[in-house]
């Protein structure tokens, strides 16, 4: 086991062909108010200019550590990157997404004051490909994070977490569950008795795009999660997938085609009205009144 230098924090990023938004992602980490970091970046066999971008930033900032490897997928890349990390805490960061400039400082301070927490989660703004805010992550107003995990739900963005490196390594790292490795890891951690906590501050901005891994593989992820709950009914899967599609259509502004399964037409219109209302409340009321002050902490976010 590697020894952690005092106060050092690891930031872990895996990227594949991420040249279009990689600058904003990297600069949001290098510009953190907490400076004692190592930025471990795994280039998973990119075929675009990703490696050149990474090497450019590494020359300017030696806190960046690059692992350049053949394309073996996200799970293997994260596990190899995790082995390179030496900080006590690992902060995840996904390509295209950006972090609030005080994200590490705020979360590390909270972890120092609450030493029983093993995985700390923040809220996330949802942004489009122009970094305009189009929503906010699930607030869980009537349910605790502990309840959601107990019910095998995954209500937060992978990139919005900070966890204790040694504990995740002791559990074997990220499980080999394709397109749902984060959900599988949280369940493994939770069932082993590790403690999660949510701080209700949007310290991360998660980009929804039609070429992202999560979007492109939503059906696979959803089926994996349902099977992990013991649910194999095809009607349940279709209803849940339709819910995900309508939610993205309304909240994320992605021009997707939706094929409404036979017999679920009324359900589609119900979902459409429901998500339209949620979107209005989030963008017109909640964010301006409660969370707009956090927008200034992101270097790339634009006003609507």
Image (tube, rainbow, N blue to C red):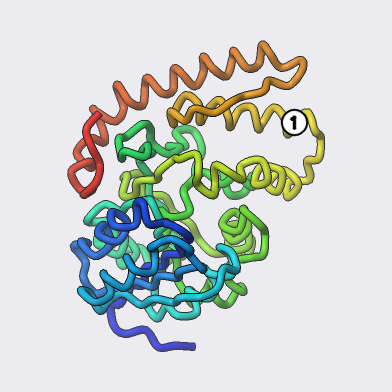
The secondary element bearing badge 1 is classed as helix
Would you call the spot at circle 1 few (<14 residues within 10 Å), some (14-19), or many (20 or more)? few
Q: Position of residue 280 (x, y in %)?
A: 37, 19
In this picture, residue 246 sits left or right of residue 207: right
Residue at position x 30%, y 21% in the image: 284
Picture quadrant where residue 138 is located: top left
Q: Nearer the viewer, residue 224 or 216?
A: 216
List the single residue furthest toward the right: 233
260 to the left or right of 117: right
Residue 118 to residue 285: above or below: below
Residue under pointer 1: 236
Q: Is residue 81 above or below residue 279?
A: below
Question: Where residue 1 sits: x, y (%)?
Answer: 49, 88
Image x and y of residue 253, in percent:
43, 28
Q: Position of residue 42 (x, y in %)?
A: 45, 70
Picture residue at 54% right of the left edge, 17% below the top: 272
Side (left or right) of 6 relative to 1: left
């Amino acid at each position: 086991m590697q020894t952690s230098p005092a106060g050092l924090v690891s930031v872990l990023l895996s990227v594949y062909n991420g040249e279009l938004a990689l600058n904003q992602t990297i600069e949001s980490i290098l510009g953190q108010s907490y400076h004692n970091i190592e930025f471990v970046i795994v280039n998973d066999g990119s075929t675009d200019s990703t490696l050149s971008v990474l090497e450019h930033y590494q020359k300017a900032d030696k806190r960046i550590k690059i692992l350049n490897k053949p394309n073996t997928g996200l799970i293997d890349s994260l596990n190899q990157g995790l082995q390179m990390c030496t900080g006590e805490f690992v902060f995840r960061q996904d390509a295209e997404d950006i972090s609030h400039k005080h994200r590490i400082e705020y979360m590390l301070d909270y972890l120092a004051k609450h030493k029983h927490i093993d995985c700390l989660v923040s809220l996330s703004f949802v942004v489009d490909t122009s970094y305009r805010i189009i929503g906010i992550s699930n607030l869980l107003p009537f349910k605790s994070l502990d309840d959601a995990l107990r019910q095998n739900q995954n209500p937060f963005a992978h990139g919005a977490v900070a966890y204790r490196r040694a504990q995740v390594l002791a559990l074997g790292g990220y499980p080999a569950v394709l397109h749902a490795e984060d959900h599988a890891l949280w369940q493994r951690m939770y069932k082993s008795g590790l403690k999660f906590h949510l701080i209700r501050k949007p310290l991360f901005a998660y980009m929804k795009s039609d070429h992202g891994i999560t979007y492109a593989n939503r059906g696979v992820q959803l089926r994996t999660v349902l099977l992990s709950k013991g649910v194999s009914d095809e009607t349940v899967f279709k209803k849940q997938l339709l819910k995900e599609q309508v939610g993205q259509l309304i909240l994320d502004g992605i021009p997707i085609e939706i094929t409404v399964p036979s017999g679920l037409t009324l359900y589609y219109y119900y979902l459409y009205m429901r998500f339209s209302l949620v979107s209005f409340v989030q963008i017109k009321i909640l964010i301006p009144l409660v969370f707009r002050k956090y927008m200034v902490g992101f270097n790339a976010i634009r006003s609507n």
